[in-house]
Image (spheres, rainbow, N blue to C red):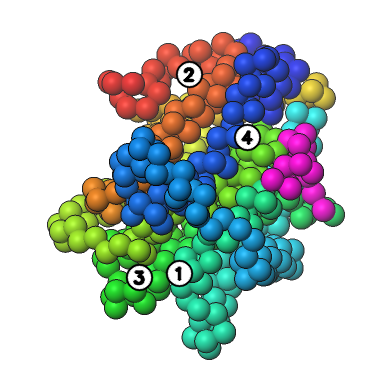
Amino acid sequence: MDVIQHKNASWGRAHERNTFKHQMMSVLFLLFCPLCVLVANVIMCEYQGSILSFLQATANGSIYRSLTAYDFQFDQSALTAYTTWVLFQAALFQYLPGKDSLGQQTPGGNILPYRTNGLQAWFVTHIVFGVLCWMGVVDAAIVPKLWTGLIYVTNMAGSMVYDFQMGIEHNPRIGETFDLKLFTIGRVGMMSWTIIDISNAAYQYQKFGSVSLSIICVSLLHAVYVVDFFVYEDWYLRTIDIAHDHFGFYLAWGATAWMPVMYTLQAQYLGQHQTDPSMAYVAFTFAAGLIGYYIFRTSNNHKDLVRSTDGRCTIWGAAPKFIRAKYTTSDGKLHESILLCSGWWGWSRHANYVGDLILSFAMCALVGTTSGIVWFYGVYMGILLIHRSYRCDKRCRDKYGKQWDEYIRTVPYRFVPGIW
């Protein structure tokens, strides 16, 4: 087979051109995303999660009065809480025992070491939070009660990280193993999901005297996704986020401000409003979410199994079909990778994204149809993963060349067999 010679064409932004269009898109991204976070909070708090009411207020001019009267200002309690959170997560990240793992090989042939202790940190975090709430040291509903101040603090924190890094480094580190990218995404961002959910459930209980089935199921699906992230943290080291993307505004601010606010809109809404979808509806939607997770997890496991065993395994009871693709790194060394064409990957080139999308929309659907903004996460994930699928195809074509074309002929569908 042909060996593809490339000069880091598939790594980071090496395959992208720094055109005026890219520069303008970056400027719009920097301006629009922080505004989107603030507007989402205004819609949630001032317009009961109704996008339509917000748009009507925008049309008649009353939105100006709402925004100017809104209390986006520095909150010492929020700063203290957030600083404590980050420092506590940093201590767990650095000192909690964990597995010694290796990242994906860089273009120069280097393999970076990591300590993956996310699952242990998740349990310690939630146990400590539970104990502090039980002792009365921390209000279980602290997150929604400080939410506006926390949004202010996280936006400032994310921006400072961006100013410092400017998106130049792939894997900036403090010492040998304190990887700032993994810490920011995994500990500051992902770890906050379930704490935010629990705190909003507590807020709902304090406000209404009960906890709804919807917020329980939303929190469970979020927990499944988050715990999965930490169980397979070693696998995450070889994804686009860690292996290819630069650590700039996109990841730094995204993990500290965008993710905690925009990914938990369902729990935020349910904390303030009790919805009552039927038991059958909730059960069906929750089951759909679990099916989506099953596709997401088993498809990723199939790929890892085939690569770790060099194809000496079975997928769905049969020997796997795959293509051995060769490539070279910038140090001139020849490497080989396996492109799986069996199981879920025989149906779709991005089977894991399909499962991820089913799970994402199920999280939104559990709230019901009373609010439009809670569907943001599903729509956003759809756009993100579709865009990422094209980035992945471009990167793999640059990396594997004709062998990637052969793979596309073998697995012609990007997402849904027979449709797309």
Tag 1: Cα neighbours inside 10 Å, few (<14), some, or many (≥20)? many
Residue located 48% across and 18% down the image: 407
* C-alpha gap between disc 3 and disc 2: 50 Å
The residue that label 4 is drawn on is 30
Indicate the amino acid at tag 3.
Answer: Gln
Location of mark 3 (residue): 204
Q: Position of residue 349 (x, y in %)?
A: 43, 27
Question: Which residues make up the magenta segment?
Answer: 159-174
Residue at figure coordinates x 50%, y 41% from the top left: 36
Q: Earlier in the sequence, mark 1 or mark 4?
A: 4
* Mark 4 → mark 2, Cα distance in angstroms: 37 Å
Please say if the residues under marks 1 and 2 sit with CB atoms less than 8 Å apart. Answer: no
Q: Secondary structure at mark 1?
A: helix
Placement of 35 over or under 281, stated as above or below: above
Q: Nearer the viewer, mark 1 or mark 4?
A: 4
Give residue 107's quadrant in the image: top right
Of label 4 and label 2, which has the lower sequence position? 4
Residue 380 visible in rendering = yes
Question: In the rendered structure, which disc, 1 or 2, sits on the residue that comes first in sequence?
Answer: 1
Q: Which residue is mark 1?
A: 199
Tag 4 and tag 3, C-beta contact below 8 Å: no
Residue 34 at x, y percent in the picture: 57, 42
Q: Which mark is residue 23?
A: none
What SS does tag 4 mark? helix
- Quarter of the image containing the N terminus? top right
- Residue found at x 37% / y 21%: 413
Q: Is residue 293 above or below residue 207?
A: above
In the image: residue 73, left or right of residue 260:
right
- Picture coordinates of residue 289 (x, y %)? 31, 50
Residue type at mark 2: give it. Answer: Tyr
